[in-house]
Image (cartoon, rainbow, N blue to C red):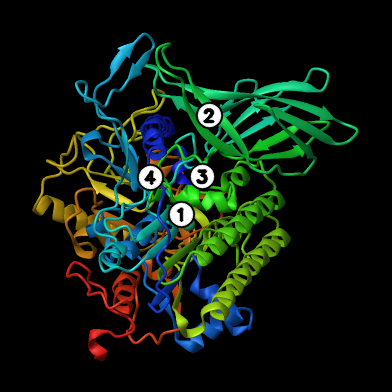
Amino acid sequence: MTGNERELDRRQFLKESTTAAAAFTAAVRAAPARGARKQRSSARRVIVLGFDAMDPVLTEQMMAAGDLPNLDRLRRAGGYRRLGTSIPPQTPVAFASFITGLNPGGHGIFDFIHRDPKHQYLPLFSAAGTSRGSGYWEVGKHKLQLTFWPFDHTAPEQLLYRKGIPFWDYLDEAGIPTHIYEIPSNFPPSPSKHGRHRALAGLGTPDMHGGYGTYQHFAQNGPYKPRDEGGGIRSRIIFRNDTAEAKLIGPDNTFLQKPQPTSVEFKIHRDRQADAAMIEVQGQRILLKRGQWSKWVRLDFRFPMPSFVPDEHQSGICRFYLQEVAPIFRLYVTPINIDPSDPALRISEPPEFVQEVSKELGLFYTAGFQEDHKALSNKVFTDEEYVEQTNIVLEERMELLGYALEHYDDGLLFFYFACTDLQPHMFWWNSDEPHPVRSPEDARKYHGHVKELYKKMDRIVGDMLARYGDQASLIAMSDHGMANFKRQFNLNRWLRDNGYIQPSNARDLTGLYPDKVGPDWSRTRAYGLGLNSLYLNLRGRERDGIVRGGDEREALLTKLVEKLEAIRDIDGKPVIRRVYRADEVYSGAEMRLAPDLIIGYHRGHRCSWATTLGDMTDEVFSDNDSAWSADHCLAAEDVPGVLFTNRPILADAPALIDLAPTIMAEFGVRQPPAMVGRNLFNPPAAT
Ligand SMILES: [Zn+2]
C-alpha cells in the first residue's frame, strides 16, 4: 500500500461512488435472506493468513532469535521460503496476482495509479471505479435516474477493474466453499456464480466520502475555512459559553444537478473542570473524557429530493476521539465508514453477508484503509495516538477473525491483515542513519513496536496451529517485504532534465495548475505516473502521442533503460536496481493500460511523493521528510515476501502466482491453462 492516493482527484471519485451508492442501497434492501450454512465436516481445509508486507529479513532475524516460535513451528512442520513478488511490488498488483495466478499482463493492474491514454495524464485508481450511468430526468435542482421502462436510464455502478478469473471461482464451481476476508483488489467483491463463495471487500473499499479515508478534525486553532489536507479535513471550532456547533461532512448529494456535500450537525458541550466533553448528534449523547475514544456512532445522511419523491438516506458510522478539552479544544473524527449493518455500497459477496457479520459483531471499520496513517503523516495524531488507533483496529480484526473461524467448517478460508504493512510504513526504521522525522531513540522504540506486532501475528499463527494442527493446510504469506525509504527520486524532473519532457522549464505534467508551466506533448517522449510506471508518449496509443512504434520505440526504450539504471544519487549511490520492460516481464490479454517501463528502485530510494502525479520539484533528489518512512515500491528482487506452510514446499523459488494453483490442487481442482504458476507442494519437476 502507499500513501500517494491522497493526492488523486478525490472529488471526482467521491462523486461517482456516492452516485452508485444510491442505486445499491435500494437493491440490497430487496435481497432475500441467506439460507443456513451447509455442514461438510469431512472435507478439506486450506487456511491462508495474508500478512501484508511481512518482511523476510526481519522475520528470519526474529525467528533465529526465538521471537517467532509459532512461525518457526510452521516452518518445521512444512517449510519456509522467501516468496517471489509481483513487478512492481505494490499491494493491489501483488494480490491481484495471488487472486488470479496471473502476472499484471493477465489481471490488468500495474500500479496503484493508472492513466487513460485517451485523457493523457488523468490519474485513475487502478483497481476500482464507477461507471457513469446514462440518462436522467431534470426536476428543478435535481436529476433523477429512472431505471424502469420507458425511461430506462442506467444507474452508475461500482466496477472492479481486476481482470482474469479469481481462483476461488474454480473452487466455487467445484462445490468447495470459500471465505475471503478483506483481500486487497477485490472491491466491489467479484460475484459468486455458484453461491459457495463469501467475501468481505478489502483494500480499495472507499469511505463515505468516496476516497480512501478522510478524517475530520475540529480544533479551536483550526483554519476558519475548512481545509482539505489530503486524507483529512481540518476546521476551526468556536465555543460560546463552552458550547460549540459544528458539521460533519458526509457524502455528496449526487441527486442534485450540482452535487453538494450532505452534512450532519452536532453540538459539543465541554466541561473544563471535568476535562471532558459531551457530543450531541442526531439525538445521541456521547460523553468523552480527554484521551477517550467513543464507540461507533451511526449517522443518518439525508438526501433531500423533489417533493413528490421520498428523501433518500444513507447510513455512515464514525468514532470520536477527544484529544484535548482546554486550553485548545481538539476533536478527531474517524473517516465516515460505510455502515456494515446498512451498507450504502456493495462491500460483500453476497451483498447481505456484511450485514450478517454485523448482526454478530456490531459496527466495525469497513474502509480499505483502517489504520489512519494519514492522521499521523499530517500530524493530527502523535505516534502514541496512532498506535492507540491501530490497536482499536487490531481488536476489531481479531473479533472478525473469531467470526470467520466460527463460521468456517471446511473449504478455503483467507484472512487479511493490513497492520503488518501500514504500521511498518510509519515505524520501520532499522538502521542507524538519521530517521526522516523521529529522534534516534524514538526510531528505535518504534522499530521495537514493529517487532511486537510481528510477535502478535505469530501468536495468531500459534492459535491456528492449536485449533487445526494438521487438519488443515495452513499457509502464512506476505505479498512483499519492506525497506527504509530515505531518499526521494523525482522521475519526471529527471526526464525533463534529460530532454524527454518538454519544454525545459515545465513544472507540472497535469496541466491543471495555471501558475506552473505545463507539458508540450508534441515534444514530450516519455513520462512517469504512479509509483513505478513510465510511459512512452506513443503515437496511436496516447492522446497526443509522438513516438513511432518499431525502431523509434525500441531505441528509446533501450536508451531509457541504460540511462535510468546508471543514475547515481548525489553521494554516488545507485538509485535504480533494475528497469523492467513490460514487453519482457508481462504477458496476457490485459496489456492495454500497461506502462512501457517499470522502475525497480534500490532499498532506501523510491519515487518522490510529487512525481507520482506529475509535479516536478526543483531537485531530482530530496530527503523523504514524511512519517511514512518505509516502503516497498522497489525492484521486486529487493522486497520478496514470506511463505510459511505446514506442507513441505517442494518447488524452487516459489512466487505469488504459484499460490492459486497450489491451493486449487489441495482441493483436487485442475489448474487452468492461463495460470502459469506451479503447485508448490507437488511441482511438475518433482513428480
Ligand atoms: Zn504498503
Callout 4: helix, strand or loop?
Answer: loop
Asked if marks 2 and 3 touch (Cβ < 8 Å), the reply is no
Callout 2: helix, strand or loop?
Answer: strand
- Reading the image, the residue beneath label 3 is 340
Mark 1 and ligand 1: say if the CB distance to the nearest ligand atom is below 8 Å: yes
Q: Looking at the image, which residue is at 24% across and 52% down?
A: 594
| Residue ranking furthest to the front | 36
Q: Is residue 412 above or below residue 396?
A: below
- Reading the image, the residue beneath label 2 is 250
State how far apart marks 1 and 4 are (Cα): 36 Å
Asked if marks 2 and 1 touch (Cβ < 8 Å), the reply is no
Q: Amino acid at mark 4?
A: Pro
Left or right: residue 667 versus residue 82 is left
Sequence-first disc among 2 and 3: 2
Q: Is residue 407 above or below residue 204?
A: below
Q: Amino acid at mark 2?
A: Gly
- Reading the image, the residue beneath label 1 is 1
Q: Nearer the viewer, residue 553 or 258?
A: 258
